[in-house]
């Protein structure tokens, strides 16, 4: 049965460490304390097998606790693990001087906690076993003094045979530094005095260095008569292999109590150290490309910045993002996308110079830390090499892929003096490059930071706008060309922004799309438009159709069918009175899932229109797959068709195609009498634009419809 004492002033940590300790072995008993003084008082009469203590505690810290604990009877050899959030070496040095055996960095990795605790308990078990066997030896010697010399010799030989079976290096030296005993494990690893020349040169050098170091430690044990705290050491064995051991040194006393020799025990922990190294590698490297990750890059930046500052030189950070990488995953699959990422990582590693760091930060985002950025030309040359390397075609399973990157570059010290600041400024520069359409490279400029702050402020204002219900809807009439009657309206979002008045969506919609706030905003728009359309019907207006714009983000994050069904159910609006306006961004992403969602809504009677038709390259490809009721011709073509025969031809072609597919057509942005005459001649179904009315608040729209109704009744 092993007794583990856990000392931490936080109850949560005590509970976590208790559960972890209980998994080490079924016979483990755990005793916890929140106060170090109480723990010391309890351990006056109780000797644990392992102590795990936090460094920062009330009354005394972990170093002072360890020092006092070592002074307790029977506690000199008990392993002590100190857990600390401090990375400075000074804290570890204080704990080591006080007698700590091992350290763990907080927050504690659970697997590492269990592994280290299990190894130290195993070491403690070996220590107790050795003490027990040493005690047996002492008793045997005492008995032998009263018996024959031959019986004494036999006892010693039998005891030596037993110790030879222990899987640890065990040896003893006398006061003159002579080795008086070495077990089989010790000889297999280090050899004996007569075989000291065996093994490769590195092993012999390591052996000599170890012997010198151990001589100094043995002298300390002989001088003080006290055991030394356990310590880790690397040993090169006779075959040249590097192995790791945790070593303890204890005094061996004669019958009269005088220290006659020093017992050294070394338990191998090579597997544990290898597991730790593998864990550290996993924590600091990307599993797909095996490149350093963001954690590694941040740490390296934090170390390079002081060096560059001291040397008066610059370093550059290049952040790059693959353009249109999502389409590779969507079209060719994630496995081929992963292969492309590996190829990009390999090419970047070839481009990087000696001492540079290439990292994958996640997704399709990479970084290069250029540590030798002597001139602006050298930095620009690196950016060019990166773009050229990534842009070379890559052949993956017979598919030739062309890639390009958006690259942002920031330079220390001008653009930032910390790892966090440089990563931020590189990110801002990269997004500026991406905003230029991809395939571009941008250096960080101070105004980018200003724009970023403005974006943060806008985000906060948008959130307040949602919470305080500052948004409202205007309605632009949609008119039947044949009758001239208003048959519906498009719901258009406005923001009553404090200090700015009524703001149109062009000033905030892109930001709402980027930060995801478009989802709750559009959800409100849908419910409010349905409520308003139902109020029109109850107030005596004709059964008008209301059109609501949808966002691609809604289809990615929400169950659109459930969202629309809920709005219709709450408002009581006839589904046939609701039209959802879709864009190409919606129909091009996750085509199958979007088609499925629209089909479910179509069964309810909801109508769909394809907005801004004619401006995209894929509309004709996808339009036949979707349950579209109406095409909306983009206002760009409407404005130009009276002056440009080509634009008129495009309008005529769209209307003709819609006729053949049994779609209705709405022309947007109609502003002049001439445009109206041309659309009437082409038999366009509906129009909307300033020629009839600007977007109106709900009450003004109702007044306009009533006015038209009165004119119709008097005609």
Image: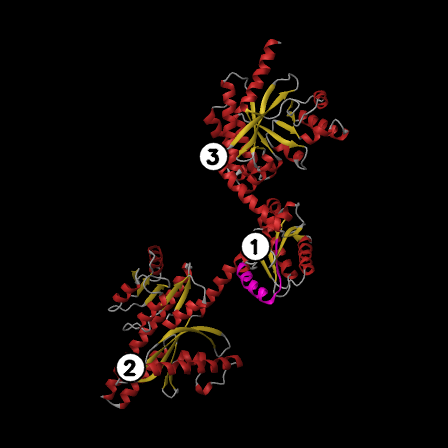
- Dot 3 or dot 1, earlier in sequence: 1
Q: Is mark 1 on a helix, strand or loop?
A: helix
Which quadrant of the view contains residue 595? Answer: top right
Q: Where is residue 581 in the image (x, y as percent from the top left)?
A: 59, 30
Q: Please name which of the two marks, 2 or 3, marks the residue nearer to the observer.
A: 3
Residue with the mark numbered 2: 137
Q: Which mark is residue 468?
A: 3
State if disc 1 and disc 2 touch (CB < 8 Å). no
Q: Mark 1 points at which residue?
A: 423
Q: Which residues make up the magenta segment? A: 298-319
* Rendering quarter of residue 473: top right
> Which is more toward the observer, 535 or 315?
315
Classify 10 Å Cα crowding around label 3: few (below 14), some (14-19), many (20 and above): few
Residue 473 drawn above or below residue 178: above
Q: How far apart are marks 2 and 1 (CA)?
A: 64 Å
First along the sequence among labels 2 and 1:
2
Q: Which residue lies furthest to the left in this view?
A: 146
Residue 267 inside the magenta-drawn segment: no
Q: Residue furthest top?
A: 714
Secondary structure mostly taken by the magenta-highlighted segment of the chain: helix
C-alpha distance separating marks 3 and 1: 35 Å
Image height check: is 58 above or below 682?
below
Looking at the image, is mark 3 or mark 1 nearer the viewer? 3
Q: In which quarter of the image is the C terminus?
A: top right
Can residue 293 be seen at all in this image of the molecule? no
Magenta-colored stretch includes residue 301: yes
User: Tag count in the figure?
Assistant: 3
Percent position of residue 113, x then y: 40, 62
Q: Which residue is drawn at 45% across and 72% down?
A: 244
Residue 295 coordinates in the image, percent (x, y): 52, 58
């Amino acid at each position: 049965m092993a007794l583990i004492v856990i000392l931490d002033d936080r109850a949560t940590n005590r509970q976590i460490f208790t559960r972890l300790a209980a998994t080490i072995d079924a016979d483990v008993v755990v005793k916890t304390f929140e106060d170090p003084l109480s723990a010391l008082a309890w351990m006056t009469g109780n000797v644990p097998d392992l102590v795990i203590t936090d460094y920062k505690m009330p009354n005394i810290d972990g170093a002072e606790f360890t020092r006092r604990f070592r002074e307790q009877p029977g506690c000199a050899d008990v392993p002590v693990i100190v857990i600390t959030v401090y990375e400075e070496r000074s804290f570890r040095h204080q704990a080591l001087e006080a007698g700590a055996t091992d350290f763990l960095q907080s927050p504690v990795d659970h697997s590492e906690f269990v592994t280290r605790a299990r190894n130290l308990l195993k070491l403690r078990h070996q220590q107790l076993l050795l003490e027990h066997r040493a005690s047996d030896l002492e008793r045997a010697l005492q008995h032998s003094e009263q018996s024959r010399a031959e019986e004494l010799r036999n006892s010693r030989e039998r005891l030596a045979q037993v110790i030879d079976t222990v899987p640890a290096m065990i040896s003893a030296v006398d006061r003159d530094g002579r080795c008086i005993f070495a077990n089989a494990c010790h000889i297999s690893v280090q050899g004996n005095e007569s075989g000291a020349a065996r093994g490769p040169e590195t092993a012999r050098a390591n052996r000599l260095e170890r012997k010198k170091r151990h001589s100094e430690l043995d002298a300390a044990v002989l001088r003080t008569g006290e055991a030394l705290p356990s310590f880790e050491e690397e040993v090169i064995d006779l075959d040249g292999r590097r192995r790791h051991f945790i070593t303890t040194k204890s005094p061996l006393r004669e019958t009269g109590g005088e220290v006659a020799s020093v017992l050294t025990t070394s338990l191998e922990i090579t597997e544990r150290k290898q597991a730790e190294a593998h864990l550290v590698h996993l924590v600091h490297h990307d599993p797909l490309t095996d490149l350093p990750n963001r954690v590694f890059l941040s740490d390296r930046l934090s170390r390079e910045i002081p060096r560059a500052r001291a040397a008066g030189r610059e370093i550059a950070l290049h952040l790059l993002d693959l353009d249109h990488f999502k389409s590779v995953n969507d079209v060719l699959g994630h496995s081929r996308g992963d292969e492309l990422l590996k190829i990009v990582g390999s090419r970047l590693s070839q481009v990087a110079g000696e001492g540079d760091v290439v990292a994958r930060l996640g997704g399709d985002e990479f970084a290069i830390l250029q540590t030798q950025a002597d001139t602006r030309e050298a930095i620009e040359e690196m950016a060019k090499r990166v773009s050229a390397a990534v842009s070379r075609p890559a052949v993956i399973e017979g598919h030739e892929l062309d890639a390009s990157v958006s690259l942002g570059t920031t330079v220390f010290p001008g653009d930032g003096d910390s790892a966090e600041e440089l990563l931020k400024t590189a990110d801002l520069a990269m997004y500026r490059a991406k905003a230029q359409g991809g395939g571009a490279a941008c250096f960080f400029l101070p105004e980018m930071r200003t724009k970023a702050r403005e974006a943060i402020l806008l985000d906060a204002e948008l959130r307040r706008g949602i919470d305080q219900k500052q948004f409202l809807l205007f309605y632009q009439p949609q008119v039947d060309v044949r009758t001239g009657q208003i048959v519906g309206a498009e719901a258009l979002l406005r923001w009553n922004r404090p200090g700015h008045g009524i703001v149109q969506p062009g000033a905030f919609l892109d930001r709402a799309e980027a930060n995801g706030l478009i989802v709750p905003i559009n959800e409100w728009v849908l419910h409010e438009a349905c409520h308003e359309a139902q109020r029109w019907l109850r107030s005596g207006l004709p059964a008008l159709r209301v059109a609501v714009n949808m966002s691609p983000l809604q289809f990615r994050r929400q169950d659109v069918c459930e969202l629309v069904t809920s709005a219709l159910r709450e408002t009581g609006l006839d589904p046939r009175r609701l039209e959802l306006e879709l864009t190409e961004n919606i129909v091009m992403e996750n085509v199958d899932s979007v088609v499925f969602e629209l089909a479910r809504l179509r069964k309810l009677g909801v109508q769909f229109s394809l907005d801004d038709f004619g401006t995209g390259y894929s509309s004709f490809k996808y339009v036949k797959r979707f349950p579209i009721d109406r095409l909306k011709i983009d206002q760009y073509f409407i404005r130009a068709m009276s002056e440009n025969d080509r634009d008129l031809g495009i309008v005529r072609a769209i209307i003709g195609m819609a006729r053949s597919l049994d779609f209705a057509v709405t022309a947007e942005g109609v502003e002049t009498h001439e445009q109206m005459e041309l659309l009437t001649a082409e038999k366009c179904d509906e129009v909307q634009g300033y020629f009839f009315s600007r977007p109106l608040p709900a009450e003004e729209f109702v007044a306009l419809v009533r006015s038209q109704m009165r004119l119709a009744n008097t005609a």
